[in-house]
Amino acid sequence: MEESRGTEQAVLLQSLKRLIVSFVCSLPMPLLGLLIMLLLIYNSFSVFSLHLDPIPPIKSTPSLNHHQVLHHHPSVSLPSTATLTSSSKSDSLLLLAVKETSSGYIQKQNVSSTNAERRHKLTPVTTQKPQGKSKARFKTRIKSFLFKSSCESLFFMTWISSIESFGDRERFTIESLFKSHPNSCLILVSNSLDGERGTLILKPLTDKGLKVLAITPDFSYIFKYTSAEKWFERLKKGMFSPGVIPLEQNLSNLLRLVLLYKFGGIYLDTDFIILKPLTNLHNVIGAQAVDPVTRKWSRLNNAVLIFDKNHPLLERFINEFTRTFNGNKWGHNGRYLVSRVVERINSSSLELRFSVLPPSAFYPVDWTRIRGFYRASMNESEAIGRARDLCVYVNIALLFIFGTERVRSLRLKKEASFIDSCLNLVSSVTLLLLLLYILVTKKNV
């Protein structure tokens, strides 16, 4: 009985296939060509789109050829297939990455709070042990994760905010990471995400077989055998002031340097869209701004760092942090730190093998001006120009930053969104191509 049913279903399926093929073959050639082109367009969007799985509610109780190297040390280990050449097109894309004229954006701080209050408030953050776990737990979990996972690339991110702050933007960053690097591993260093609620947030990723580990940092273990070890001990003993800048922010600046120094890999902030694979890059840092006259970098940034294990430049960054730490100046221990160190390096130094990529690679739109790309266009001409510029940036950049403090609190309108502008431009071009195809086909017939 079951065999006869299976045979009937097979016959029906075969008949249906013949019917569909006959119908398609009977279509006029222009219509058939249009149908095929629409299928190709749909396939393109499905391939390059990102899918975010819905997160269940949480209970409150428990190619590189486009980029010109601005600074290249002789022995840098870049792949031969990714030779970096100068390009007038890439130079033209630096218009938003000119030399900074302002002193930088400073987050609002409660400067009136005393240093004693600041130190008392943040001491538990720096000295607390992992939730219910021994300090050896960090070492064991990291080694176990790396041993069990076959990592084509190793990524690091830090999350110093509350778990409630981890939203769609951050999930989108992680989705884009694995879209470009499906065989990579991500270590998300965070107190708040290392628990049951964090596991629930990351479950849509781990269910797909993606390799993600959220882990509470053990600073004493991580900083051991570096100059950060003594600095951290002095901090815990209250031997110097952490300053008015949130200590968590400065610890994140130091943490990324030491993690890369000890493990090697790629560090990323959680506010990037990854557009292209980064696996061909080795020992690089990105310029955030260039001098409009000399075309040399004027400011670097530590939001993206790609370095091998035990790289000497990372050691210099760590030493600079512990030697010149200042908790009262925003950026002093982060982006300005890496700029100071690289600026002092003699270009003939052979032991420091690294390259500085132009802003078009990691920071195609300067962070001080990015807010303008999130507001609605004043007129049609401005909208078309903005969409064109954004799509050009996406074509040449490796990353695109989208979640800075300047735009995090904005209520975005659909017509002003980054993706919507690009898709509108693509749709217009696609429609024009289809019309041209139909006209040419009719003329030939």
Image (cartoon, rainbow, N blue to C red):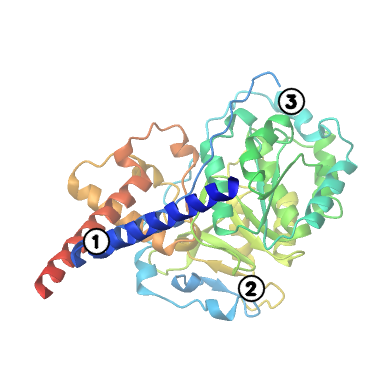
First in residue order: circle 2 vs circle 3:
3
In percent of width and height, residue 222 lies at 81, 49
Q: Amino acid at mark 2?
A: Asn
Q: Quadrant of residue 444?
A: bottom left
Q: Is residue 97 visible?
A: no
Task: For marks 2 and 3, give the CA distance.
Answer: 41 Å
First in residue order: circle 1 vs circle 3:
1
Which element carries disc 1, helix, strand or loop? helix
Give the tally of numbered discs.
3
Closer-to-camera residue (36/119): 36
In percent of width and height, residue 215 lies at 75, 41
Q: Is residue 2 visible?
A: yes
Q: Quadrant of residue 352?
A: bottom right
Residue 34: numbered disc: 1
Task: For marks 1 and 3, give the CA distance.
Answer: 71 Å
Residue located 88% across and 40% down the image: 135
Name the residue that disc number 2 marks.
346
Q: Give the vertical position of 439 relative to 223 (above or below).
A: below
Q: Quadrant of residue 154?
A: bottom right
Q: Amino acid at mark 3?
A: Ala
Closer-to-camera residue (5/134): 5
Q: Residues within 10 Å of mark 1 (few under 14, many from 20)?
A: some
Q: Is residue 302 left or right of residue 63?
A: right
First in residue order: circle 2 vs circle 1:
1
Q: Give the vertical position of 140 relative to 237 (above or below).
A: below
Q: Residues within 10 Å of mark 3 (few under 14, many from 20)?
A: few
Closer-to-camera residue (203/157): 203
Which element carries disc 2, helix, strand or loop? loop
